[in-house]
Image: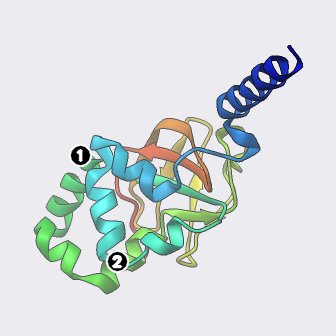
C-alpha cells in the first residue's frame, strides 16, 4: 500500500510541476513570439536578416514595439523600395529594428507618457496618453495590442514602422 501511495504522490507532483511550468518562464522568447505570429512574419524575417535574432532571443529583458506586416508594407511604399531590397540592406535594417527595442520589460502601465524613451539604437521616441508613438521623423504609430508577454520581455504590436533619423 505504501509503495502504491508513493507512486501516486510522485505522479501527482510531476503533473503539478508540468501544469505550473516547473517554476521557470516557459513563454517563447521575443523572436519565437514573432515567428509564431503570422501578422509579424516580416518582422521575424527582418530580425533574422539583420542578424539580431541571437540578441533578441537572449536573456534581456527587452521591450519590442513590433510592427505588423501591414506596417512593413507601408514602410516599403514610404521608402520606395522592395521587401527584398530592405532585407538586403543590413545597416538600414539594423538601425530601424534597434529603434523598436527598449532595454527592460516595460508594460503598458509603465510606459512613460510624454517623456522621450531611449531605444537600443540610441535615439528616442515619445508615447502619448492615447498610446500613439511619435518617431524621429514625426510619424505616428499606434499601439494596437499591448503587453504580449515573452520569456525575455514584452512586445507591443504597432501599426507603423518607426523611423529614426535616416
Could you tell me if the residues under marks 2 and 1 are in contact, i.e. CB atoms within 8 Å? no
Give the answer, above or below, for where 161 lies relative to 122.
Answer: above
Question: Viewer-proximal residue, 48 or 125?
Answer: 48
Look at 84% across and 25% down and name the residue there. Answer: 6
Question: What label sits on residue 70 in the rendered view?
Answer: 1
Give the answer, above or below, for where 138 lies relative to 70.
Answer: below
Question: What label sits on residue 30 in the rendered view?
Answer: none
Q: Is residue 26 visible?
A: yes
Look at 13% across and 76% down and name the residue there. Answer: 85
Q: Is residue 86 left or right of residue 164?
A: left
Look at 38% across and 56% down and name the residue there. Answer: 139
Q: Nearer the viewer, mark 2 or mark 1?
A: 2
Image quarter for residue 118? Answer: bottom right
x then y, percent, for residue 153: 62, 53
According to the image, label 2 marks what residue?
A: 50
Q: Is residue 165 left or right of residue 151?
A: left
Q: Residue furthest right?
A: 2
Amino acid at each position: 500500500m505504501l509503495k502504491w501511495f508513493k507512486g501516486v504522490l510522485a505522479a501527482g507532483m510531476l503533473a503539478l510541476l508540468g501544469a505550473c511550468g516547473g517554476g521557470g518562464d516557459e513563454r517563447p522568447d521575443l523572436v519565437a513570439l514573432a515567428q509564431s505570429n503570422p501578422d509579424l512574419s516580416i518582422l521575424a524575417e527582418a530580425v533574422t536578416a539583420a542578424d539580431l535574432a541571437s540578441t533578441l532571443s537572449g536573456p534581456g529583458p527587452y521591450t519590442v514595439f513590433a510592427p505588423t506586416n501591414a506596417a512593413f508594407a507601408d514602410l516599403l511604399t514610404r521608402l520606395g523600395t522592395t521587401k527584398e531590397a530592405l532585407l538586403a540592406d543590413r545597416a538600414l535594417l539594423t538601425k530601424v529594428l534597434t529603434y523598436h527595442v527598449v532595454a527592460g520589460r516595460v508594460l503598458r502601465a509603465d510606459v512613460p507618457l510624454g517623456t522621450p524613451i531611449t531605444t537600443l539604437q540610441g535615439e528616442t521616441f515619445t508615447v502619448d496618453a492615447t498610446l500613439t508613438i511619435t518617431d524621429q521623423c514625426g510619424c505616428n504609430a499606434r499601439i494596437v495590442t499591448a503587453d504580449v508577454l515573452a520569456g525575455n520581455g514584452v512586445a507591443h504590436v504597432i501599426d507603423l514602422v518607426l523611423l529614426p533619423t535616416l
